[in-house]
Image (tube, rainbow, N blue to C red):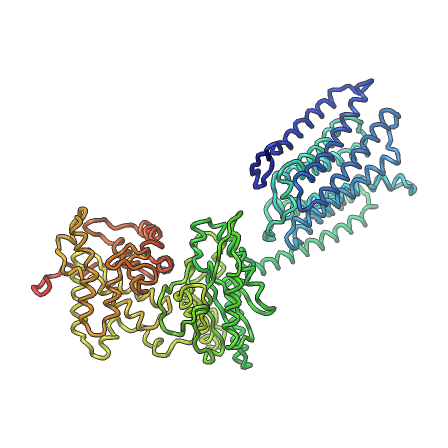
């Protein structure tokens, strides 16, 4: 039967191996205690040497065993560490034998060579491990480690090496003696680089670094005691060296050693307080050494100190230059995906439009929005959403050319600027983006893959060259008309909204703003030609509208946009009833229905209702980029949606307690009655249909016809959200007014069941941007006439 396995720090290992490293440490500590308890004479001396050798050699055996058992991808670094530990153990045994049995206090030549020989193996193993742990380049950590190493080398030269070398004739023995501090400096450099660098830091990492610094600390004390006297074989330094060996063995036996060679995302090149203090102290060591030499009238080491000062000065300048470059890069780079920011994309778009206008060139601008992205966050958590965004960015980057500008445009929006793209190439490029993202599922967490798609809106310069296009894969025309379906982009909104969900690494500085067109007027393009500014705003608006149509057509679509007709742009501020009144058709009937809506509102609440619903419906439809006819139809239906309640008893509408089954049956007929009243107005068939459907639910559980999904008209889905919000935010006979946060929560709970989730997202986005506003007081209780009672 296979051994039972369990996850330990994310690594699945056999149960007996989970505590092997701890058992090894406990046995090793007991061995160290036994080493000091055994007297260093007679038979005890042999036992003491044996204990020291076993502990030292056991570390090499532990590294070999751990590498064979856990099979890390980076095996060579561990094998080099094991080989170095073997040489170290042999050198220790040779030293103790020479000291105790041969009564030789000085190291023999062979012992020195063995001790020095283990350093290159350990340094090489650590260097390879650091390289495997580093994703890309990490010059900041390399320079910081160099600063500390140079400062340590200056101290080592002044207090150890120079004293040993100066005043003696050159001899090979002297050179070998100087080799110990030099090798320790090399080991210190890679150890500091390991600590300052990137990479995962599981428990095995801390065991390994503790081993290194225990060894380095013991070596430093040994060098000072050897130079100034006081070193005795068998003192407490042996415990530090043995502890270093145990730490190495325990690191290799810990299950997380398999992750020690795995890279982690590079951290921003900022300086923490501790790191800054350490670097400042290291840099100041050189001038402090000069002052020390001056005070003691020792000038022989001034050339070496001057060289160290120059090196430290150069490293400091290079580090400062790196920090400046990092800040410049971070200013135009999204922290999560590594793409450019929206601000950078906007600046480049303005430059490319100006260049194309001067030279008669072309360009393409694309906005891609992740479909149903909020569901990934809600189901798997924001870290999974982050991972999805990172993978989508990587896939989009694979299909871009050198010179293209790819940016994270919003929470789950990406923008691509393609200089030189002709109008005929826009669809092909957009399709390539869509297909590359949808090609394979994305791993959002361990063993969990999610199919992710994007909708893409495209626009090209010159704008007059771009006509209309259909939704990719559907064969239907998107053009500039209003397609069936849901036209609200997910998350931040194709209209440039700021509805960024929590998490997913969106920084406030990344330009998730209220819209490109809105920000342009605040001075971003103030220094540019007015014609260029207008072209940029129109280009982005065209791409936004195209994206809205792609989302409305069913997602995973491509739409190439065209400029809005002049009539649409000119009529965007028209009043709610202009469609009917402009040609003089039945203005009196429309005015009567408005009066009925106001009467119903006054019976329901002291706050306005239908006026606000109509206003918000117009806002949502406009944000979706629909034509003026659709916008006005949504507003008109919102203004009249409750007129069917005029035939219901006032006692039913004002009843504070639970309704009976019969009362519910009557209430659920008011959309039908309202549609019939609106249908009396000629050519109001569309408005009547929206009124009939405004209580249908997205999951099909609504009334009166139990429609679901996109079978419900877009305007009706908009009204469902606006009507519910107005009802929750007003005082009613059957409920008190909900707070804004409570009402927000109710909308979130109704996503995908009662309401179209994308409409909810856009409404909450607009609410967060302060565009919805509060309900105004109503006009008061009306005097009912016999004609309507």
Residue 80, by quadrant, is top right
Horizontal placement of 545 versus 281: left or right?
A: left
Horizontal placement of 149 versus 450: left or right?
A: right
Q: Position of residue 765 (x, y in %)?
A: 38, 59
Q: Position of residue 705 (x, y in %)?
A: 25, 59
Residue at the spot 66% in from the left edge and 55% down from the top edge: 137
Q: Position of residue 647 (x, y in %)?
A: 13, 60
Is residue 155 visible in the rendered structure shown here?
Answer: no
Considering only vertical position in the picture, is 386 above or below 39?
below
Give the quarter of the figure containing the N terminus. top right
Is residue 591 visible in the rendered structure shown here?
Answer: yes
Residue 294, by quadrant, is top right
Q: Position of residue 166 (x, y in %)?
A: 87, 42
Horizontal placement of 598 versus 484: left or right?
A: left
The number of callouts visible is 0
Residue at the spot 40% in from the left edge and 68% down from the top edge: 549
Front residue (pair 348, 656): 656
Judged from this view, the residue extending furthest toward the left is: 786
Judged from this view, the residue extending furthest toward the front is: 1
Residue at the spot 69% in from the left edge and 39% down from the top edge: 68
Horizontal placement of 518 versus 604: left or right?
A: right
Give the quarter of the figure containing the C terminus. bottom left
């Amino acid at each position: 039967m296979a051994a039972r396995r369990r996850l330990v720090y994310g690594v699945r290992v056999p149960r007996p191996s989970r505590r092997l490293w701890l058992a090894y440490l406990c046995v090793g500590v007991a061995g160290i205690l036994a080493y000091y308890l055994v007297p260093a004479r007679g038979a005890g001396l042999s036992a003491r040497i044996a204990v020291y050798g076993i502990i030292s050699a056991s570390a090499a055996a532990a590294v070999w065993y751990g590498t064979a058992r856990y099979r890390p991808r980076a095996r060579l670094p561990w094998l080099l560490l094991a080989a170095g530990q073997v040489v170290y153990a042999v050198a220790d045994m040779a030293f103790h034998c020479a000291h105790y049995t041969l009564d030789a206090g000085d190291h023999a030549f062979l012992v020195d060579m063995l001790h020095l020989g283990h350093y290159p193996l350990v340094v090489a193993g650590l260097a390879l491990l650091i390289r495997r742990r580093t994703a890309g380049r990490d010059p900041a950590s390399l320079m910081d480690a160099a600063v500390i190493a140079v400062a340590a080398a200056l101290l080592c030269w002044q207090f150890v090496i120079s004293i040993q070398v100066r005043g003696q004739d050159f001899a090979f023995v002297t050179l070998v003696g100087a080799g110990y501090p030099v090798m320790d400096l090399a080991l210190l450099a890679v150890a500091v680089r390991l600590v300052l660098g990137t990479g995962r830091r599981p428990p095995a990492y801390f065991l390994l670094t503790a081993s290194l610094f225990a060894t380095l600390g013991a070596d430093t004390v040994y060098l000072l005691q050897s130079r100034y006297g006081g070193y005795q074989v068998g003192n407490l330094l042996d415990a530090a060296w043995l502890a270093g060996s145990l730490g190495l063995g325990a690191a290799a036996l810990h299950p997380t050693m398999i992750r020690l060679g795995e890279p982690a995302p590079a951290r921003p090149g900022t300086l923490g307080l501790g790191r800054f203090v350490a670097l400042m102290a290291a840099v100041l060591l050189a001038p402090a050494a000069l002052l020390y030499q001056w005070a003691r009238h020792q000038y022989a080491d001034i050339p070496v100190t001057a060289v160290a000062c120059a090196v430290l000065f150069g490293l400091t300048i290079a580090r400062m230059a790196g920090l400046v470059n990092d800040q410049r890069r971070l200013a135009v780079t999204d922290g999560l995906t590594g793409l450019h920011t929206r601000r950078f994309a906007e600046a480049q778009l303005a430059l490319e439009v100006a260049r194309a206008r001067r030279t008669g060139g072309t360009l393409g601008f694309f906005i891609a929005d992740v479909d149903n992205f909020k569901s990934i966050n809600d189901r798997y958590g924001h870290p999974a959403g982050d991972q999805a965004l990172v993978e989508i960015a990587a896939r989009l980057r694979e299909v871009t050319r050198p010179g293209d500008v790819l940016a994270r445009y919003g929470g789950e929006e990406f923008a691509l600027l393609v200089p030189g793209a002709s109008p005929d190439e826009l669809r092909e490029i957009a399709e390539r983006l869509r297909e590359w993202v949808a090609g394979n599922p994305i791993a959002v967490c361990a063993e969990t893959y999610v199919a992710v798609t994007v909708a893409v809106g495209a626009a090209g310069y010159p704008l007059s060259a771009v006509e209309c296009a259909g939704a990719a894969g559907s064969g239907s025309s998107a053009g500039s008309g209003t397609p069936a379906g849901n036209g609200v982009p997910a998350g931040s909104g194709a209209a440039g909204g700021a509805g960024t969900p929590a998490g997913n690494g969106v920084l406030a500085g990344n330009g998730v703003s209220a819209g490109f067109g809105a920000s342009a007027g605040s001075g971003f393009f103030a220094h540019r030609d007015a014609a260029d500014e207008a072209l940029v705003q129109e280009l982005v608006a065209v791409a936004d509208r195209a994206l809205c149509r792609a989302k409305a057509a069913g997602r995973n679509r491509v739409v190439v946009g065209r400029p809005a007709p002049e009539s649409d742009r000119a009529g965007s501020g028209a009043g709610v009833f202009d469609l009917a009144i402009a040609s003089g058709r039945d203005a009196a009937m429309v005015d009567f229905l408005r009066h009925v809506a106001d009467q119903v509102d006054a019976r329901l609440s002291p706050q306005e209702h239908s006026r606000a619903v109509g206003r918000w419906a117009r806002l949502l439809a406009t944000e979706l980029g629909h034509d003026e006819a659709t916008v006005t139809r949504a507003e008109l239906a919102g203004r009249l949606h409750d007129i069917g309640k005029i035939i219901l008893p006032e006692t039913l509408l004002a009843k504070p307690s639970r309704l009976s089954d019969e009362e519910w049956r009557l209430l659920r007929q008011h959309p039908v009655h309202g549609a019939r009243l609106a249908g009396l107005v000629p050519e109001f068939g569309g408005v009547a249909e929206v009124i009939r459907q405004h209580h249908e639910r997205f999951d099909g559980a609504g009334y009166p016809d139990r429609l679901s999904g996109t079978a419900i008209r877009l305007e009706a889905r908009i009204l469902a959200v606006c009507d519910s919000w107005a009802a929750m935010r007003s005082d009613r006979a059957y409920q008190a007014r909900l707070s804004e946060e409570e009402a927000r929560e109710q909308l979130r709970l109704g996503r995908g069941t009662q309401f179209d989730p994308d409409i909810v997202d856009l409404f909450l986005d607009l609410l967060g941007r302060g565009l919805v506003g509060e309900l105004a007081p109503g006009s008061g209780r009306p005097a009912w006439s016999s004609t309507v009672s």
